[in-house]
Image (cartoon, helix red, strand yellow):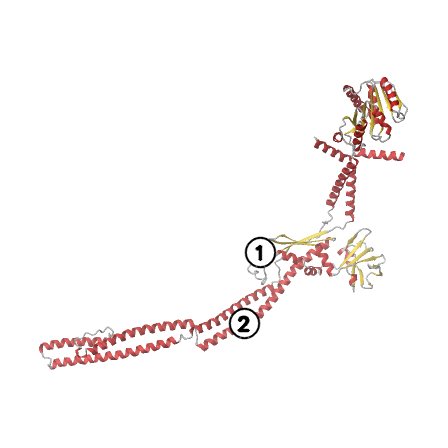
Amino acid sequence: MSSTGATGNFIKTLYRGAPLVLVLMTACVMAAKTYLKYATPMYESTTRIKLADAREGVPNANLYKDFDVFATSTKIGAEVELLKSEVLIEKALNLIPADTVIYRVGEIHTKELYKESPIEVHASMLGEKMLDKHIALTLTQQRDVVITTPDGDHYNGKIGTPIKGKNFVVTVALNAQLLKERPNMDVDDNYEFVIHSRRKLIAEIIAGLDVTSADKDIPILRVSYKCADAKKSADVVNAIANVYIRDHVEERTKSADTTEQFLTEQLQDYGNRLNNSEDDIQQYRDRNNIVNITQETETDLRKIADLKKQLASVQMNLIAIDTLSQYMRRNRGNFVNIAPNFEAFTDLLSTEIVKKVKLLQAEKRDLLLLYTPENPKVAVVDKKINDLANYLEESIGNTQTNLRIKYNDLKRTIAEAEQSFEGLPGKEKHMTVLERNFGMNEQIYKFIREKRTEAQIAKAAAISFHRIISRGEVPESPVSPNSKLIVVFSGFLGLMFGVILVIVIHSLKARVDNEQNIYRNSDTPLEKSVPMLKNAKASREFFDKWLLELEIRNKLPKGTTLCITSMNDGDGKDFVADALMKAAADAGKKAVMVLMDGKMEEFANEDYETTSPLIASYRWQIPSEWDRIAAGWRAEYDLVIIRNFSLQRSNASILPMAKSNLNMMVLDTRRTAMAAIGEADEMRDRLQLPGFQYVLNRAGYVPGPIDRVMIIIKKIRRAFSK
């Protein structure tokens, strides 16, 4: 309940202060519109650049992969810093007319003309003191030119004629092309021009430049420039984008050219080294009779292996023939009866001799069957056997000699063949070093030739894989100041300041706005809340009902003295007292009203049945005298209503309050301060006032804006009438 009441009171407070809030809102909006009228609008143009990505698109094609020789992967952050660099900005300034800035000077506003200037200013021999200074220029109808320096020096001249100053020579000419397109353009006016130093101009461009990337992983850059001229903003971003692309091509071409020169020198150097390596190998082969070490070594090894196999075979045959020769010599006289092993002596002739010997032995046996051993036939056979045995023995000896000669010859041949392997590791090592040097020089030579070819392709291909995907357009509307936002925000600020001011004023005034303020700040009962009664009928009905309620509650017995008081004049005590008096008359009561303001009048009205005298008693300040007179009133009348002084007007007001049966302190929601409640309670406790109660006048009354205006007008009229 309390929160609902607080909210309602707050809304009522704002409603009362609505005129002040509206005035502040209107003032803020008007101030904002005035500011927008004279503020310099700022225009912004934007271009977007897509950076080359080696992982996709055209740069990923095999033909273009090696165009950027020895280049690392593109980093977006580095490209952002490059676009904001002074070197690139200085190159871009060569494409736009930004060194000389001309302004048209008005009474309040100064506007940069850029390409819309009807005049052109050409300065030479300009001293450093004149750079970055605003120099006034006035052009008259007679085409006279007046130049005023920042030091206050004046120089006069004619249009198209050089004007010499202390530190400069300036020529002012008409912009014939623009005047041809716009013949009605005003030329005679006040101007200012500034000759910017290159450093200052670069700093101004960088200050208005904004370079951002769409995302750290998306190679797209957004280049924006904000300035006071729409065309200039578009020209600057387009110039920067073009210079960036051109600089990329130039740097890449320059890099490729430098790389090509370096690779050509290195190619010649390594070509000489490769030739020297070939000569070293040739000379070493000639000195050492080397054709192919690997093949020659393999051939010699196979040859030695074959010789060793032959040597082993000859050695085995030689051993076998030696054994046979020894066996033959031991049994020389008994050749017929021996059985030699001819395994190692297997030639056809020996085999035939042995066969013949065996045949002769068989023949001898046959002859011995017929003849004696001394028989010539037997002797002839023995002689043949001996001849064959001698021949065979001689043959074995010759064979033995031949085998020994062959054996020795094979050993000598093997020894000579093995001599060719002496120093072979050293030759192989030296040959390996020579071939390694040759191979390394050959590889480097091939690599350099490939890279030189790539550099030549990159040099010949004057293209850039960075692309301008959207160019800066001339903006149609400024980005700042944002008129709608500023007006809305100003209105909002006016609203906030108005609300705060209303709350502050309400807090400083601290009026008794409603019943809750009385309940929170006092224990004195609230007898009645009198609303704002618009007409006499509503007033009559309300007070008749109130008087009836007082009768029902036995608040008004016969002879009751009712004192109606307020803290200040105008709080409503007169209205309440008069209305209760009329209600008492309507109820048929015999009542009297005592006026404490000194007016001697009769309360007479045809609407009332009785006529009651009105008694001026403001001079009665003696309590005993008051008691005597008041006793007579109580005896004669049913109800005595005292319309007392206001407490702030006279100290005599406390006497009728102390001598009355019932006291009503009238508080007004629009006029009575909150401090009055505390003062009234303190007076009640100090004087022990009987039947002390509050009456809240104009309860719930919240005047509208029109009512507030009318009240203010009435106050002004009263002030002037006095």
Please determine whether, in this image, residue 646 is positioned above or below residue 495. above
Q: Which of 690 and 686 is in front in this view?
A: 686
Q: What element carries label 2?
A: helix
Q: Nearer the viewer, residue 23 or 563?
A: 563
* 249 lies left or right of 702: left
Q: Count every numbered label the image shows and give the total.
A: 2
Determine contact: label 1, label 2, CB under 8 Å. no
Q: Which of 105 and 546 is in front in this view?
A: 546
Residue 604 seen in the figure: no
The x, y position of residue 690, in whole percent, is: 80, 24
The x, y position of residue 498, in whole percent, is: 77, 39
User: Residue beneath label 2, please?
Assistant: 271
User: Residue beneath label 1, please?
Assistant: 57
Q: Nearer the viewer, residue 115 or 384?
A: 384
Which is in the foreground here, disc 1 or disc 2?
A: 2
Identified by mark 1, the residue type is Gly
Mark 1 or mark 2, earlier in chain? 1
The x, y position of residue 406, in whole percent, is: 30, 78
The image quarter containing residue 381 is: bottom left
* 357 lies left or right of 462: left
Q: What element carries label 1?
A: loop
The circle on residue 341 is none
- Crowdedness of circle 1 by 10 Å Cα count: few (<14), some, many (20+)? few
Residue 464 seen in the figure: yes
Please determine whether, in this image, residue 404 is positioned above or below residue 196. below
Identified by mark 2, the residue type is Gly
